[in-house]
């Protein structure tokens, strides 16, 4: 008897979820603008993730949240 496809699950921490959501929006913009093809989809996905990480790091560098203590 053949088995069906194995289900996969993953769980993202809040910061990972934020990067995932930003990367998904960036990737969707590449698709909407016609830049995605079968040949470059992996590259654009990786680029979207890298860009989301860079945006997150830039925000982290520039904004101090309420629960971060200011160094004296």
Image (spheres, rainbow, N blue to C red):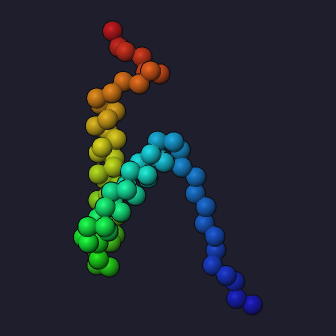
- At 34% from the left and 61% from the top, the residue drawn is 27
Instruction: Indicate the quadrant containing the C terminus: top left, top right, bottom left or bottom right.
Output: top left
Quarter where residue 70 is shown: top left
- Is residue 1 in sight in this rendering? yes
- At 38% from the left and 50% from the top, the residue drawn is 22
Tell me if residue 17 comes above or below residue 42 in the rendering. Answer: above
Tell me if residue 5 comes above or below residue 66 in the rendering. Answer: below
Relative to 22, 5 lies left or right: right
Depth order, front residue of 10/29: 29
Residue 37 position, x and y percent, is: 29, 77
Relative to 4, 36 lies left or right: left
Name the outermost residue toward the top.
Answer: 72
Tell me if residue 20 comes above or below residue 40 in the rendering. Answer: above
Instruction: Indicate the quadrant containing the N terminus: top left, top right, bottom left or bottom right.
Output: bottom right
Q: What count of labels does the image hold?
A: 0
Tell me if residue 13 comes above or below residue 1 in the rendering. Answer: above
- At 40% from the left and 58% from the top, the residue drawn is 24
């Amino acid at each position: 008897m053949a088995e069906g496809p194995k289900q996969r699950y993953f769980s993202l921490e809040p910061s990972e979820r934020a990067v995932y959501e930003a990367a998904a929006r960036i990737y969707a913009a590449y698709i909407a603008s016609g830049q995605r093809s079968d040949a470059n989809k992996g590259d654009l996905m990786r680029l979207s993730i890298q860009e989301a990480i860079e945006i997150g790091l830039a925000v982290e560098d520039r904004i101090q949240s309420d629960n971060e203590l200011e160094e004296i």
